[in-house]
Structure formats: C-alpha cells, structure tokens
Amino acid sequence: MSTKDSDVVLEEMGGLDSESLVESICQHHLSNLGRDYGRSDKFSLYQALAYSLRDRLVGNWIKTQRSYYNRSAKSVYYLSLEFLVGKSLTSNAINLGIEKETEEALGKFGVTLEDAESAEVDAGLGNGGLGRLASCFLDSMATLGIPGYGYGIRYEYGIFKQAIENGEQVELPDDWLHSGNPWEFRRRGFVFTIGLYGREEKYTHDDGSLRHRWTDTAKVMAMPVDMLIPGYKNGNVINMRLWEAQPARRFNLDLFNSGDYIRSMEDAVKTETISKVLYPSDKLSEGRELRLVQQYFFVSATIQDMLRRFEKIKLDFSELPNRAVVHLNETHPAIAIPELMRILIDEHMLNWDQAWRICRRTFAYTNHTVMPEALEKWSLDMMRKVLPRHVSIIFEINRRFLEDVKNCFPGDEERLSRMSIIEEGEYPQVRMAWLAVVGSFTVNGVSTLHGELIKKNIFYDFVEMFPGRFTSVTNGITPRRWLKQCNIPLSELITEKIGKGWVTDLSRLHQLESLAEDEEFQNRWYDCRLKAKKKLVEYAQKEYGLYMPADWMYDVQVKRIHEYKRQVLNVLHAITLYCRLKKDPSSVAVPRVKIFAGKAAPGYFLAKRIIRLINSVGAVINSDSAVNHKLRIAFLPNYRVSQAEYIIPATDLSEQISLAGTEASGTGNMKFALNGALTIGTLDGANIEIMEEVGRENIFIFGMNADEVEKRKHEGYVSGDVVGGDSELAEALNLLADGTFSEGDRDFFAPILDSLFAEGDQYMTLADYRAYVDAQDALEQIWLDRKKWLKMSILNTAGSGHFSSDRAIMEYATSIWGVHPMEKES
Ligand code: 26W
C-alpha cells in the first residue's frame, strides 16, 4: 500500500460528530474492553471514550510528525524528569474541538463528560510547579505549532497519594496504572540500550589516535511509551515520550545457562526499579544512586532518539544545533551535556573541540529555584561508579573551563574554586548547576525578579564571565485547562462579551476592562463565581465530607507545604481571627473559610508538622460554636491537578505569601488571578508582574520586598524582637505553645515554634505578620463593598493575559530556541 492509500486510513480513524463517537464508544466496548456496551458504566465509558479520542488524535499525530520530518524543521527536545499531566479526557475533547459532541454522545449512555472523567486517574508524574509547567508548555507548543517533543520517565508510581489520619499526612502509593492507561502507546519494538557502571578504557584507534571507550557496562533497555498531546483546534498533535525501563534480556543468558535462574530474575527485577517511582521531594536534592540512574537512563535514551532522527537527514554533526535544541528543565537532565560529548567523541570520533562547539550551541537550561538545598550536587565517588566515562568528560570540561577562567581573571585563585564544576573537599561533589551553565548557550530564570536574583547571587561569578548568557522568561499557564475547561460558566460569559479569540490570544482579556464597572455584567460575573463555588461545595462535601458555605469568602492557599511558602503565617492569621471572635463574636465582619491543600515531602518533618498544625487549629475552630459562624478551616486531602480545577475557579482570595526572594515564580498565582480571585501577596516571583498587569490598586501587596529582606537579614533580624510590640501576635503564639490546639500537649508544636525563634525564623514569618494581618483587615472592608470587589475581580481576569503559556513559549521560541511555528501544510 502506498502512503497515499494509507492516508485515506488516517482520515478514517473516526468522525467528529456525536453519532460517530457513539459508534466508536460501542466498538471499543467490544474490541478493547470485551464488554457489552448495553451494560456500560462510568469507568467503561471513560475507557471507551478515551480510546475513541485517541483514534481521532493518532492520524493528526502521524501527520504532524511527518511534517517535521519533511521540512527538516528545527525541533525542541524538552527534557523534564517531571510532567504533571492530570486528567486528559476533557482536555483532549476540548483541543479536538468536540466537547459538545462528546457530551452529546455520552448523554446517549446516560452520563456527562464530568461523570466519565471522574473515572480517570490523574497522571501525577511530578511534584508541583516545575512538572505542571512542563505540561502547560507542551499544550502551548502543540497549540502554536512549535515543532517539539516532551521527554521524561513513565513512572509506574507517580507522586504519592496523601491521606490525612488524625490530622497527619500519610503517604500511599499512587498506583495510577492499575486499570491501564488508554492514552498511551507502548512501543515494544523501539527500544534503546542504556549502559551503566563499568569502566573507562583507553585504546589506540585504527587511525593511530588515542581514544576512550566505556566498557563492561551493565545494560538496561529503555522502551518508549508515547502520549499524544493535541494543540487547540489546529490539527497538531505532539509527542510526550516517556521511557520505561526493561531488563536487557528477559533472562540474563550467562547466568541462566550456568543454572542461576533466580539471580537472573533478580537482575531483571532490579532494572525494572529504574522507572518504578517518582522521587517525592521538591526540596532536598536526594543524592541517591537510583535517582542518578533515573536521570541518566532517560537522558541517554532521549539523546539516542534525537540522534537517530538527526542521522536520518544525513548532515554533518556540526549541523545539529541548527536542527535541534535540547532544553533542560532544571539540572535534573544536565547529564545530557557529557552524554552528548561522549557519543560524539567516543562513538562518532569527533575531536573535543568539534564536539564541544556542537554541545555549547545545543543546550539551554532553566533554573527554577534559588533554594541552595535544592541545587543538585552528586557525590563524585558515586558518579564515578555509575558513570565513569562521564566523570572523566566532566573533568576535561572543567579543566578547559578553568583555563578560560584563569585567562579572564588572572590571579583570582578563590574564584577558581568557587567556579569549579567539581567542589573540592573531603567528599568532592559535582555541581550540576555549574555544568549546566557552562554547557548551555542560555540560562533563564522563571520570572523577572528570579532572573535578576540568580544573576546577583548563585550565578554571580558566571555572569561576569558570560554576561550575555543569562535571561528570564516569565512562566505561564495554559488558558485551555485553567479557564476554558475548569470554569465553563465564566469562560462562556467572557466569550459572549469579547468573542472566543481569547482562548489562543489571552491578551484579548483586556477588552473586559471596559465592563468592569457595568452593573449588569458584574452581576453576571458574580453568578458565574457563585456557580464555581457551589461546584466546589458539592465536591468537598461528596469527596471529603467538608462543609463550606458558598456565600462566605473562600480564602485559599493550595501548593506544596514548605516553610518558605509560609503556610504558618496564614495559620497565625486564623488564630488571630479566632482570638478576636472569642473576645467579641461581632468583631470579625466577614465570614470566611480558609482552605488549604498541599503535600509535604515524606522526609520533611517540619512540613508534615505544619499540616498537623492546620488540621489541629481547624478542629478547634470548626467545632467551637462561638467562632464557627464566622470562621472555618478546611484542609482538602491529596491536592492534585484535578482537585485544583475545582478549587481555583471557586477562590475569592488567593494567598501568595512566600518570603520575598524565595518563590522563583509561582504559577498557581496566575491561575487564580485568571479566574478572578484577588491576590494577597508579597512582592515575590511573578506576583510582581501580576501587580504590574492588574494594577497596584487591584491586588493586596504586603510585607517586605526582596531588598528589604536582604537588608533586614544583614542588620541582624531577631524574631523575638517583633513579638513584644504586637499583642495579637504574642497571643497567637501563646496559644500554639500552651496546648490549646494540641489537647494540652505543650510540646507538640514546639518544632514549629523553635523554627520561629531558636532557629532564627529563616523565612521571617514573624517580621511580616503585622503587615499581613493589616492587609487582611483592609481587604475585608473591600469585600463588604460588593461592587468594588467585583470590579477588582473582573480587572484581575482582564489583566491576566500576559500569563498565558502561549506567550511564554513564544518567548522561548524566538529569543532562546530559534524555532518557528510551522505553517499548515496545504
Ligand atoms: C532535586 C530535588 C528538587 C526537585 C524539584 C529540587 C527542586 C525541584 C523544583 C525545582 C521545585 C519546583 O517545582 N520549583 C518551582 O518551579 C516553578 C516553575 O518554574 C516555579 O513557579 C516555582 O516558584 C518553583 O518553586
């Protein structure tokens, strides 16, 4: 069959009308599920519909991939150890442009799209912001027609499931693949071999040159598992390729033949652990061998896949940077730099300078955090054991780099040790961030402030050497999932007023500005917001038995639990309101429910204690009839993408209260503002840009800015000093200490109090307390002025256009990657 004939098949993979969908759903019940469609249920309908949508994506996926190939377009390889996908059913229906038809088709089976999606399990292959950003970026690349691929690991277990028992976090395995994944294609025939361990060997090549090779390695196979990512109504479908580890051979034949059957099986089991589980920490760099193996495993498979494609077009390797750009999402995939060097030098016999010139033009690196603990460093000993050849390449990169440093800054010995990729000491370490900076042509931060801060602190020495290398691209979020999909009433109202163009050109939301004071529009805006709140009420009641009256203010802080994000500051405010209400039940004007959600890294003791604090304070407040008519606390267990889709549209007040200078960007902050929540926040990360976009008068900014934080630290901040002058703060802290929230156990919250006093209050929670409480008091007055609040809410949505991931991806494409949107093939 010629390609032309088969293209007929591509077109025939399924009609987009509701009748064709009904037919497909029935067919998949028979062919894939082996079930009677007359006895379908939510789960079978979800699965059959997912297969039906996949049928409708795959033709366009093949066409998209072919057109990259036919045009030899330069493509982006977005390497990320995390993708926080969430659910795909509704999102794929929307991007295919068949949401209505899908609803109609499901209606024939007596369920809604929301019902069917409730049977889908979140793909939670990430920890938080960094992973969700990667997924928003793929949505935008597909939507804009930027040629590219997402690459990562197909973890068998994603981020743990959080249960709350006695107010405490309990971690449960996330067995997300338990009932299969209808979205993926597992490509058993397309595996790559990955080497590990072994040793480096010198030898003389036939041409007489002295060469190196990596030998005696253990072998693991990487099998691609593809998930299709459609663009919004444009026929593009890009690929997210996740690698699954498999034993090199079902049986290790040597061992098998020598009769050691059990040991050969043990080896197989060991290799399968590589893609078993996502590391659940977004704080400490783990330093574990398995994590390094995960990183190398997916990087090596990806670079091989990239070179396989490049070699098909039969160009000189020097052309590689004109055909591919490898984007490193954090340093997690930075081992790609020595890996590409190794392949070019050892396997393709390029000399060092040729190979290095190629590498230096191929990689770009995004930094996502200023926390020094999160900067990755690998023990040199461990790395030498796992990747001996790469270590020697890193040494050579470092040796040449330090030569350059010496030439640039003669006589500056200290600088050499600061800038060395190898950190000397009793236990020498490889500094992955330095490796990423040296090996990339661009390094970017994720907000304007963050971009400036990393230049001023962690990368200061490098900026002096490579001033042009550093930049920033402010993060963004996809307006498809984070407005159109999760907030249907509001998005329909917006479309009615300004047309549907905002979905792919979010800056058009500015047109709402002229309606901000229109009373009729405000009332309709209010109705939409109320609908979203009622939807959350129902969800929280059904899933968790929580009660939250829809006419109260929803004051929301949902994100990973971290000291720097200062959930404790929010709790101190809750305790202050509690104290006021105890003294005078009419002293608090605005009824509010403080909603919290978020996971703590399993090994992060204090974060777990903070979860317990939130729940304990909540238990006391919620059951006290003297206060619970005005104040409640709700902790929603197991925060995840699909839960965020309920919470965010229902939020009145978005808490973005990190210590200035600590949150690189934040992306939740953008999702809330887009949906019309008002922000109470510090001048941190992208909050600053949100303020600039929505207007200083439409956001509640409080506390120290990053410069003031620095100054205060420099002067010598003593947290105890602020308590004396603030009786409300002193009272709140006393209640924490005297056992009020811990059934009389005075020691229970001591670790939290110690962090605020004995350990110096690193995140300056107490220093910002008064400004925070004052800002809360002031915003209550605005809440009471309903018209004013609604106006501000509308102006927040209107000013959020800048935070589309489409804008962010266009910035990457033009100012970093040098790639262009594909014109549609005629
Ligand atoms: C090595 C352990 C580890 C794992 C993950 C360290 C650090 C991370 C991530 C960098 C943490 C993270 O998700 N950072 C967040 O990235 C978002 C997307 O750029 C930003 O919006 C957040 O501010 C930043 O905290």
Image: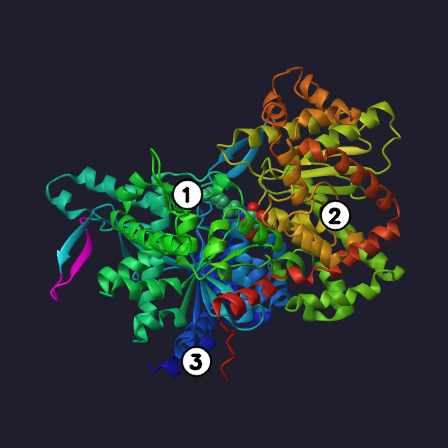
The residue to which callout 1 is attached is 414
Q: Circles 1 and 2: CB distance less than 8 Å? A: no
Rendered location of residue 631, percent (x, y): 78, 33
Tell me the kind of residue under disc 3: Val
Name the N-terminal-most of marks 3 and 2.
3
Q: Which region of the structure is painted magenta?
A: 205-216
The residue to which callout 2 is attached is 533
| Residue 772 higher or lower than 679, as above or below | above
Q: Secondary structure at mark 1?
A: helix
Q: Nearer the viewer, residue 89 or 635?
A: 635
Q: Quadrant of residue 494?
A: bottom right
Rendered location of residue 492, percent (x, y): 73, 63
Name the N-terminal-most of marks 1 and 2.
1
Rendered location of residue 772, percent (x, y): 75, 38
Alpha carbon separation for disc pair 3 and 2: 47 Å
Name the N-terminal-most of marks 3 and 1.
3
Q: Nearer the viewer, residue 81 or 59?
A: 81
Tell me the kind of residue under disc 2: Lys
The question of residue 461 being in magenta is answered with: no
Q: Secondary structure at mark 3?
A: helix
345 with respect to 674 (left or right): left
Name the residue rendered at 83%, 61% in the picture.
516
Alpha carbon separation for disc pair 1 and 2: 58 Å
Q: How is the image coloured?
A: rainbow
Residue at mark 1: C-beta within 8 A of ligand 1:
no
The residue to which callout 3 is attached is 8
Rendered location of residue 50, percent (x, y): 51, 60
**Number of the front mark, 3 or 1:** 1
Name the residue rendered at 87%, 43% in the picture.
781
Q: Secondary structure at mark 2?
A: helix
Q: Circles 3 and 1: CB distance less than 8 Å? A: no
